[in-house]
Image (cartoon, rainbow, N blue to C red):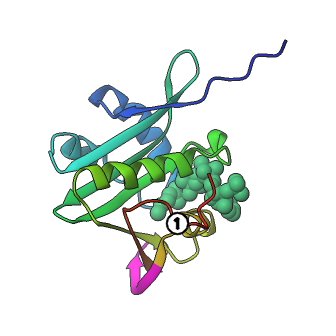
Amino acid sequence: MTKLAPRPVLRDMAAADLRAVMTIERSAFDEPWPESAFSGLLARGDALHTVATAGKTGCVVGYSVTLVQGRLAQLANLAVAEGARRRGLGRRLAREAVAASALRGARRIFLEVREGNVPALTLYEELGFEALSVRPDYYSNPSEDAIVLARTTGPPRPHESS
Ligand SMILES: CC(C)(COP(=O)(O)OP(=O)(O)OC[C@H]1O[C@@H](n2cnc3c(N)ncnc32)[C@H](O)[C@@H]1OP(=O)(O)O)[C@@H](O)C(=O)NCCC(=O)NCCS
């Protein structure tokens, strides 16, 4: 009988994960965060940082970083390794960010995304995020507008798929 590959596990990010996180970060973004941004956030009490690990070795295949301040959360970073995409991991990480923000008291969660980032926009819209505004030329390298999206952290809406 063929064994199914185990589902990736979500857990808190640790300092030991940063090397793997940075490898994904550099390949996923034109303007990657420096490692110091991740390590600084690991020390902050208002930041939620999650990694998805897969396989027997538990290698990091995705991560998210969310900042929670009072009733407002920001999904500040989310990426999945290229070889692990389109398997529902981005969706799981984003949902976890929403649920964990709610547990910390946030009522709304927002994020910014490049206007041309179709995979991310499709994912967030599927999860019930709605476009709020545009930040012209928010990104550089290349210059591009940001779309600001937000949703409540409440229960899933009817159009969210499982
Ligand atoms: C955006 C990203 C995190 C999605 O991760 P993922 O694990 O591939 O996403 P999922 O498999 O959970 O996809 C969930 C849904 O999002 C949408 N989606 C994901 N990738 C897509 C793509 N390339 N094209 C169109 N829709 C896409 C689909 O609706 C998909 O559902 P489906 O597979 O049932 O059709 C990933 O592409 C990534 O890391 N991109 C680079 C970093 C980035 O842009 N991060 C977001 C910054 S705001």
Q: Secondary structure at mark 1?
A: loop
Residue under numbered circle 1? 157
Can residue 72 be seen here? yes
Q: Residue at x 37, y 30 (%)?
A: 17
Left or right? Give the position of 131 relative to 68. Answer: right
Residue ranking furthest to the right = 1
Q: Residue at x 38, y 79 (%)?
A: 138
Query: Is 105 one of the magenta-colored residues?
Result: no
Highlighted range, magenta: 131-141
Quadrant of the frame with the N terminus: top right
Left or right? Give the position of 10 relative to 1. Answer: left
Residue ranking furthest to the top = 1
Q: Main secondary structure of the magenta part?
A: strand
Q: Is 19 situated above or below 101?
A: above
Counting other residues with Cα less than 10 Å from the Cα at mark 1, is it few (<14), some (14-19), or many (20 or more)? few
Q: Is 11 situated above or below 149?
A: above
Front-most of residues 79 and 69: 69
Q: Position of residue 128 (x, y in %)?
A: 51, 69
Which amino acid is tagged 1?
A: Arg
Left or right? Give the position of 36 relative to 53. Answer: left
Q: Position of residue 85 (x, y in %)?
A: 64, 46
Q: Is 65 situated above or below 22?
A: below
Q: Quadrant of ligand 1?
A: bottom right
